[in-house]
Image (cartoon, rainbow, N blue to C red):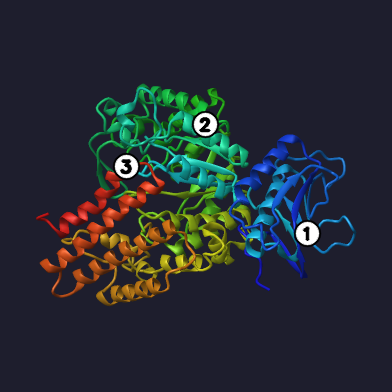
């Protein structure tokens, strides 16, 4: 018997050795109110549509509250502990598939303490139907999530903003994996009235669109939280003359040991900064029903290097930072919203933590295998603060994804987060440098994250075939394992391609693949990612993956993955050629430029199938810079 491939993996599943044939599959609901019944209809409508339930018998799936109907599946919403009232936050459920023992007994029984629990049981049932059709194995499932909040954050500020149809498809799919929280990371990608010069050409989300998405999320049991960075990462605003005067600096500054220039953070001591944020949140937040907002406030490393230099010297960075964050949170509170913020700055300056209101949720983020989620959570939890762990998909700056780093990062976040008392798991999918990773690479990673967020104990044993079935469709049986191999295409190179440590030993490359890094390293700069032999091995692996391209994919996903292979191949061939003794001849430059020209054309086509036109030219510019270097005469 093929084991059930479920996404996420249930906490406890036991096969009992038999089979049942549903024949026809009516579902009767007992013990629910109309709102709960509506949510169940909603759940099945958006998640059963991709399952062929007709089978040879021509049967169909429907729901009924009619007690006289003879059900094959029955769902109970009831309290397992006697008189205790139903708990809306109790997402546990049990699902039993067993042969009839009485005339009107159903084959399938789902029980839970809440509407959410029954919906999650129904989602598991639908996934079983997707795998087995109407001939189901007998089994028992006792299931409950590791984290109360299981979220996804999609970056819509690095050029790529999905169309509304794409956003609706995405939330429907996330809901089928028991995801219950969503954020869209925003810097300048909301259509703020009166600030058109900031978002003009970006194809931003409008208030009406957010309200439609909010309604869709609510119907599927997903909380759509507002998101607007309110401190750092404000270049999209501050580069315009109208806002330049409230920047911390428009000149030179350092990020760690790396020189930077131009505006980045709002000046925390300028009243104009808070005035702008008050206006933005006042326009943004009324479109959301959740009462939650992510105010960002991460990576404000330029603060103290510009206009706030004297204030920081006199009072300390912790005081200046925390005072500003508190003001932003107060604005959100007056709008009826609870704030969350990225916790990197308070972890760098722990003395700031006690100055920030306890109600703010601390988001602990990190995207590498060695991210110390456990110690960071304990440090923040010691102050009595709610904490969420925030790993990443490792899709950005990669072309192919980074399977080893992703899997280790997700596992650490899930397991250490549970042990340290984190109440939320928010996986992030960023779009650095033009958001050029294709959606299937991100989608596969999000599926694995959903598995880790629901069942932290199973995070180390994720089965990529479940992603094949429930992210890409039942026929796409091989794409999950294939994507895992693709994401480790240059894994051996990544292990030693980072900066040398204090002892002069190599370290792993962080936040990127070697394919991506070498592709964007100018030809006249020193390269450190691998030898000629190493890159020939990468190309051989790429040839093998091309020969074993997965079948059963819809044409759009197949095209996106073929495009991914084309970009990876260009990077590998360019890396090989530049390491050969003869280097890049004029003829070879023209050949690579011709391939890149086709890549840019296909990038444009694929972009518009899922994303709005705004940001496309900025994304293509990253490829065009490489083109100009390969073909300087045009």
Label whose residue precedes the other's in the sequence (1 or 3): 1
Where is residue 545? Give x, y as percent: 40, 72
Which residue is found at the position 43% from the left and 45% from the top?
348
In the image, residue 56 sits, relative to residue 262, either above or below, namely below
Q: Secondary structure at mark 2?
A: helix
* Snapshot quadrant of residue 137: bottom right
Q: Secondary structure at mark 3?
A: loop
Where is residue 346? Give x, y as percent: 47, 41
Give the left or right position of residue 470, taking residue 267 as reference: right
In the image, residue 187 sits, relative to residue 196, either above or below, namely below
Tell me the number on the disc at residue 96.
Answer: 1
Where is residue 138? Give x, y as percent: 76, 66
Other residues around mark 2 within 10 Å, as few (<14) / some (14–19) / many (≥20): some
Q: Is residue 394 visible?
A: no
Q: Secondary structure at mark 1?
A: strand
Extreme residue in the left direction: 633
Give the left or right position of residue 313, taking residue 362 as reference: left
Locate the N terminus by quadrant.
bottom right
Q: Say which of 538 and 333 sits in front.
A: 538
Q: Do the CB atoms of the residues marked 3 and 2 lie less than 8 Å apart? A: no
Which residue is found at the position 33% from the left and 73% from the top?
538
Where is residue 610? Give x, y as percent: 41, 47
Which residue is found at the position 47% from the left and 23% from the top?
282
Q: CA distance from mark 1 to mark 3?
A: 49 Å
Tell me the number on the disc at residue 211.
Answer: 2
Label whose residue precedes the other's in the sequence (3 or 2): 2
Q: Say which of 247 and 225 sits in front.
A: 225
Q: Which residue is mark 3?
A: 615
């Amino acid at each position: 018997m093929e084991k059930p491939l479920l996404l996420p993996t249930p906490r406890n599943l036991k096969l009992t050795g038999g089979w049942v044939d549903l024949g026809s599959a009516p579902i009767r609901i007992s013990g629910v109110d109309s709102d709960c019944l509506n949510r169940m209809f909603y759940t099945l409508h958006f998640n059963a549509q991709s399952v062929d339930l007709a089978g040879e018998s021509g049967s169909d799936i429907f729901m009924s509250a009619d007690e006289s109907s003879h059900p094959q599946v029955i769902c109970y919403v009831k309290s397992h502990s006697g008189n205790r009232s139903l708990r809306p936050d109790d997402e546990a459920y049990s699902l039993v598939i067993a042969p009839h023992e009485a005339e009107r007994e159903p084959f399938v029984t789902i029980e839970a303490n809440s509407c959410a629990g029954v919906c999650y049981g129904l989602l598991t049932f639908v996934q079983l139907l997707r795998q087995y059709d109407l001939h189901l194995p007998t089994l028992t499932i006792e299931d409950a999530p590791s984290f109360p909040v299981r979220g996804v954050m999609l970056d819509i500020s690095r050029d790529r903003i999905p169309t509304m149809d794409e956003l609706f498809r995405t939330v429907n799919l996330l809901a089928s994996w028991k995801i219950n929280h969503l954020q869209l990371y925003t810097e300048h990608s909301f259509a703020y009235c009166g600030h058109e010069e900031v978002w003009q050409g970006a194809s931003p989300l409008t208030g009406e669109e957010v309200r439609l998405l909010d309604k869709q999320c609510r119907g599927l049991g997903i909380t759509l939280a507002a998101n607007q960075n309110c401190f750092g990462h404000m270049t999209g605003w501050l580069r315009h003359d109208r806002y330049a005067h409230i920047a911390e600096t428009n000149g030179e500054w350092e990020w760690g040991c790396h020189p930077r220039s131009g505006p980045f953070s709002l000046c925390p001591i300028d009243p104009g900064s808070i005035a702008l944020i008050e206006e933005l949140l006042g326009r943004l937040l009324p479109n959301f029903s959740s009462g939650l907002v992510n105010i960002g406030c991460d990576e404000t490393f330029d603060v103290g290097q510009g206009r706030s230099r004297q204030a920081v010297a006199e009072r300390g960075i912790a005081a200046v930072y925390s005072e500003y964050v508190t003001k932003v949170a107060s604005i959100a509170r007056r709008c009826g919203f609870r704030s969350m913020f990225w916790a990197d700055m308070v972890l760098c300056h722990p003395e700031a933590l006690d100055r920030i209101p306890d109600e703010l949720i601390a988001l602990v983020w990190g995207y590498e295998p060695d991210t110390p989620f456990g110690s960071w959570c304990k440090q923040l939890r010691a102050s009595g603060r709610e904490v969420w762990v925030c790993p990443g998909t490792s899709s950005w700056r990669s072309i192919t994804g980074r399977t080893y780093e992703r899997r280790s990062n997700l596992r650490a976040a899930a397991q250490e987060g549970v042990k340290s008392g984190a109440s939320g798991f928010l996986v992030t999918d960023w779009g650095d440098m033009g958001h050029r990773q294709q959606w299937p690479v991100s989608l596969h990673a999000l599926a694995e994250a959903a598995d880790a967020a629901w069942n932290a104990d199973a995070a180390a044993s994720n089965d990529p075939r479940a992603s094949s079935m429930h992210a890409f469709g039942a026929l796409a049986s091989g794409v999950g394992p294939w994507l895992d191999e693709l994401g480790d295409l240059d894994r051996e190179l990544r292990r030693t391609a980072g900066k040398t440590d204090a002892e002069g030993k190599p370290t792993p490359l962080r936040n990127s693949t070697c394919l991506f890094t070498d592709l964007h390293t100018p030809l006249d700069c020193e390269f450190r990612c691998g030898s000629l032999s190493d890159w020939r091995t990468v190309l051989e692996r790429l040839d093998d993956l091309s020969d074993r391209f997965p079948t059963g994919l819809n044409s759009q996903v197949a095209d996106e993955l073929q495009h991914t292979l084309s970009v990876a191949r260009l990077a590998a061939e360019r890396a090989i050629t530049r390491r050969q003794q003869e280097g890049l001849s004029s003829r070879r430059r023209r050949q690579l430029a011709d391939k890149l020209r086709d890549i840019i054309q296909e990038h444009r086509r694929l972009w518009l199938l899922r994303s709005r036109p705004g940001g496309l030219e900025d994304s293509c510019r990253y490829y065009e810079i490489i083109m100009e270097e390969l073909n300087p005469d045009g």
